[in-house]
Amino acid sequence: MRLGELEILPVLDGAMDVPVDVMLNQVPHARWLTPEGLMPVQMGGYLVRSGERVILVDTGFGQGTLLASLAGLGVQPSEVTDVLLTHLHFDHIGWASEGTTSTFPSATYRCDVRDWQHFVVEEHEEYMRDMVSAMTPKDRLMPVVGQLELFEGDTALAPGVDLRAAPGHTPGSTVVVLSSGTDRAMLLGDVVHCPAEMMSQDWEMLADVDPPAAARTREALAKEIEGNGTLVGAAHFPGLRMGRLLSSGSGERDWAYQS
Ligand SMILES: [Zn+2]
């Protein structure tokens, strides 16, 4: 889709349906689940074009179709100018490298310094290892350390592309704010995994490093975007489709995927 001067495209790596209780502390309404009651979970990232910049937001889990999806969009790995990692969980950094080689040799890789500290320097174990390859964030990111720029908190990435701290899911979780004129969109990383999590404040995601902070971040974000037309996408929404948080006016929220 286009957002004024910007282009925002999903880049799929794979998908799986998982039991709700490995993701969330309660069961969402059936509208968010498969007929079997499982939660559909997409893996992948988003491609954002801003002028000459070709920005990949997250790199999927690393064993799927991300590179083929990029090729389908006419993008070769060497053409990617920026890789923005919303956080360093394994299913966001999978294609950062292949073996000991950088996947995107011309790109500047970026992540918040607080995730680098938590996952790479301190090597906290929770939800860090790729379940298939057992690779850690350190294993994935050492091949690109020479291309890496760390940032701390809010910063500008490119014209119309700003990064905002969204701590809780991980210490350095980052939201991408896209703007062109009065149009606005946001890529939420793992701040939410299912739109239901923006409807009320009693959700918890089981991989959240700091659940109370994650809940505060989620609610502040929901308040900011409800009813104002901001398009949002998140790293695991089915098909990486974007949508809008609607406000009924009586305090109730609803969600509509973009058609
Ligand atoms: Zn995550």
Image (cartoon, rainbow, N blue to C red):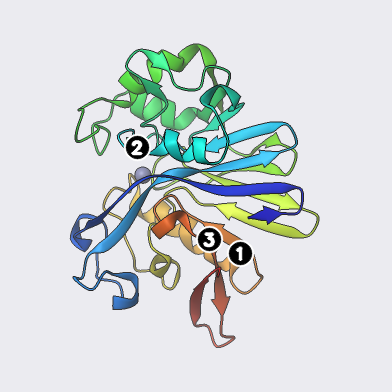
Q: Secondary structure at mark 2?
A: loop
177 relative position to 113: left or right: right
Q: Nearer the viewer, mark 2 or mark 1?
A: 2
- Of the four image quadrants, the one with ligand 1 is top left
> What amino acid type should be assigned to the residue bearing mark 3?
Met
Q: Quadrant of the N terminus?
A: bottom right
Q: Are marks 2 and 3 in contact (CB under 8 Å)?
A: no
Please give the residue where the numbered disc 2 appears in the rendered image.
89
Residue under the point 51% across and 40% down: 72
Residue 192 visible somewhere in the drawing: no
Residue under the point 68% across and 54% down: 2
- Disc 3 crowd, CA 10 A, few/some/many (<14, 14-19, 20+): many
As measured in the structure, the alpha-carbon distance from the residue carrying label 1 to the one carrying label 3 is: 16 Å
The answer to which image quadrant residue 232 occupies is bottom right
Residue sitting farthest toward the bottom: 250
Task: Kindly tell me whether mark 1's CB lies below 8 Å from ligand 1.
Answer: no
x and y percent of residue 199 in the render? 44, 73
Please give the residue where the numbered disc 3 appears in the rendered image.
242
Task: Kindly tell me whether mark 2's CB lies below 8 Å from ligand 1.
Answer: yes
> What amino acid type should be assigned to the residue bearing mark 1?
Glu
Q: Secondary structure at mark 1?
A: helix
198 relative position to 29: left or right: right
Looking at the image, which is closer to me, 78 or 94? 78
Earlier-in-chain disc, 2 versus 1: 2
x and y percent of residue 81 in the render? 62, 26
Residue 224, which numbered label?
1
